[in-house]
Amino acid sequence: MAQAAEDVLFDARNNFHLGHYQSAITDANNAKVATDTWRAERDVLMYRAYVEQGNSAVVMSEVGETSPPAVRAVRLLAMHKNADVAGKQAAVAGLHELLAEPGAASNAPLCVVAACVFCAEKDYKEALKVNQQAQTLEQHAMVTHVYVCMNRIDLAEKQVALMQRVDDDATLTQLAAAEVMLGKGSAKAQDALYIYQDLSEKYGPSTLLLNNLAACNMLLGKFDDAEHNLGEALSKSATDPTTLANALVCMQHLKKAPEVIARNVTQLRTSAPTHPWVEAYESHDRSFDRFAAQFSR
């Protein structure tokens, strides 16, 4: 039955991981699921896609206390993504409560969603802990991502090798392999670029794939190509925070006019005030103001 569930949700799952979120939502809604377990998996995919689209309000309004644990975890993910510090802490506390429930350790969708929040908190140890009994490709992909974030490329490569033994051709396996290549920097950026190009040609370019292509091109010093990738990504979603942040990096390397860069900084700060790039920028801003105040005395 587990294999059948994979077959029923294959298109939704594949589109989600490729960053084709609206297609994932459509596929999830059209999937003919026959059991509560399948419905929970479908809803997790669908609501995660809404969160990635920036439509967290849909998740917050539709998911309630009677929803399955993994689906409630997506609500906490949506809450965490849009909350202030206190709200983020409440979301993390809610996840720990869900993870303490019986059977949580074997609930793969729950563990993956929880890891998404822990990664956003940079609590990589906890993200690994909840997926230490990884049973699915998505869990192995999540563990790979965590290791890349920790700069443990050696351990990330071992996870990719496990995934390749299970299904070398799976989209998730290819994405995980490309992420590890990107983690190695310019030495493997060309190989990662080939993977993202192949996936884009096969399934169509998404904002996610275009951003990864841009990252590869920037590592290779091809900033004009990266600018083209990011322009295409912005045409798909003009307020996507990742695209705006990558565009700012690219603009700085291309020595764009200060007013153009300032305009994009304002746009990113407005659309995603808690984005890591914005937080780092504002932290540097405050530090500069403190030093300036000291010298002006």
Image (cartoon, rainbow, N blue to C red):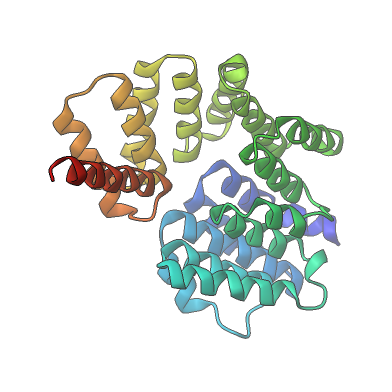
Residue in the image at 86% along x and 62% along y: 1
- The reply to whether residue 280 is in sight is yes
Could you tell me residue 238's position as x and y percent? Answer: 30, 44
- The reply to whether residue 72 is in sight is no
Residue in the image at 74% along x and 75% along y: 36
Asked whether, in this view, residue 175 is left or right of residue 203, the answer is right
Could you tell me residue 94's position as x and y percent? Answer: 60, 75
Could you tell me residue 62's position as x and y percent? Answer: 50, 77
Asked whether, in this view, residue 176 is left or right of residue 107, the answer is left
What is the residue that sits farthest to the front in this orientation? 297
The answer to whether residue 35 is above or below residue 223 is below
Could you tell me residue 206's position as x and y percent? Answer: 47, 38
The answer to whether residue 228 is above or below residue 269 is above
Number of marks in picture: 0
Place residue 35 in its image quadrant. Answer: bottom right
What is the residue that sits farthest to the bottom in this orientation? 66
Residue in the image at 37% along x and 31% along y: 230
- Which one is in front, 222 or 64? 222
Asked whether, in this view, residue 237 is left or right of residue 156, the answer is left
- Which one is in front, 143 or 276? 276
Place residue 175 in its image quadrant. Answer: top right
- Which one is in front, 116 or 212? 116
The answer to whether residue 162 is above or below residue 221 is below
Asked whether, in this view, residue 259 is left or right of residue 194, the answer is left
Place residue 33 in its image quadrant. Answer: bottom right
Residue in the image at 74% along x and 35% along y: 156
